[in-house]
Structures are given as C-alpha cells and as structure tokens.
Image (cartoon, rainbow, N blue to C red):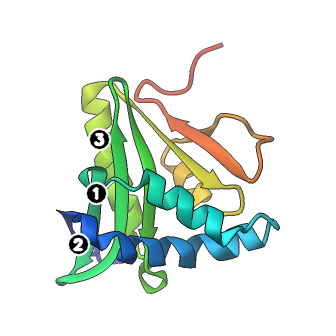
Amino acid sequence: MKQEQRFELRPARRDEFAFAESIYIDVMRPLLLGLNSWNEAARRGALRRSFKASDTSIITLNGMDIGWMQVSERDTDYNIAQIHLLKEYCGRGIGTQLINALLERARREGKTVSLSAVRTNRAIRLYERLGFRVIEPDATPIIDMVWDPYGPPRS
C-alpha cells in the first residue's frame, strides 16, 4: 500500500521567484520543445508578469522546498495558475492531494476550479481522473480545463 506523503504548504515570499522560475522552466521547456513552441524569453517574461506571491504557496516536504502552487480565487472560481514539483517528487501523489484539497474547498463553496495545461503534459490524465474536463479539445499547445462541483452540464 502506497504511503501518503506528508508535506506542508507555506506562503511564498516575493524573493522566492527565482526558485519558482527554475522549476517552471525545467518543467515547461521539454513540454513545449516537444511541440516546437518553446521561447524561453517569452516564457520567463510571462511567468514574471503573472507570478503573485500573495496567491502562491511553497510546497515543502520534511522542511525542504520541493515545489510551488499558485491559485487565484475569484468570485465563482479558483484558478490553478501554476502547480509544479521538482522532478524527483512527481508521481508520488503530492499533486493529487493538493488538488483534492482545493476541490473539496471549492465543493463546499460551490465554486468551479479551472486550469490550463500543455496538451502533452502527463498531468492531464490526473486532472481528468479528478473530474476536470477539457473546454476546447482542439486548442493547442495549451488546453483549458474546468472542474464543476455540480458535475458536467446536462444536455
């Protein structure tokens, strides 16, 4: 039986942008290179413009920083703007636990949860397993996904 990882979230500080950026670049570069869509200067600039320490948590495990997550709260939605782990901590269930906790909070509040992901990101399978659905299946290279606390819309 897989043992649940014990991790903590702590508020990010503005001076931790370099930590967040290095993980972001390590994760995004291979995904976008595979789609011939990598522009490092543009990616760094976009992250610099969108990074908000006030919406960001650093993920720690046994006192060590292993990743970060940025969630923006809106009136009717939580947006997972970023969620990244150091490569050696991927696939251990940490992302699942983080997202499930957010989904439970959103369920209690009657809010949706949205995110965007590179079409080739293996995390998309996780998002789908957790109940997210793709909004525009033909979009590329980035797809938008949403989770609805009331389930998929009825036709």
Q: CA distance from mark 1 to mark 3?
A: 23 Å
Q: Quadrant of the C terminus?
A: top right
Q: Position of residue 9 (x, y in %)?
A: 21, 64
> Disc 2 vs disc 1: which is toward the camera?
1
Q: Amino acid at mark 2?
A: Phe
- In the image, 134: left or right of 88? right
Q: Position of residue 124 (x, y in %)?
A: 60, 56
Considering only order in the chain, which callout, 3 or 1, is on the residue closer to the N terminus? 1
Q: Quadrant of residue 120?
A: bottom right
Q: Earlier in the sequence, mark 2 or mark 1?
A: 2
Mark 1 vs mark 3: give the one in front.
1
Please name the residue that numbered disc 2 is placed on: 7
Rate crowding at label 3 as few (under 14), some (14 to 19) or many (20 or more) other CA atoms within 10 Å: few
Quarter of the image where one finds residue 74: top left
Rendering coords of residue 34 (x, y %): 78, 72
Q: Determine which of the numbered discs, if any, sits on residue 53 in the image.
A: 1
Q: Residue at x 40, y 60 (%)?
A: 96
- Does residue 122 appear in the picture of this structure? no
The residue identified by callout 3 is 104
- Type of amino acid at the residue the image marks with label 3: Glu
The answer to whether residue 12 of the structure is visible from this angle is yes
Identify the amino acid type marked 1.
Answer: Ala
Q: Secondary structure at mark 3?
A: helix
Element at label 2: loop
Work out whether 72 lies above or below 37: above
Return the residue nearer the eye: 130 or 32: 32
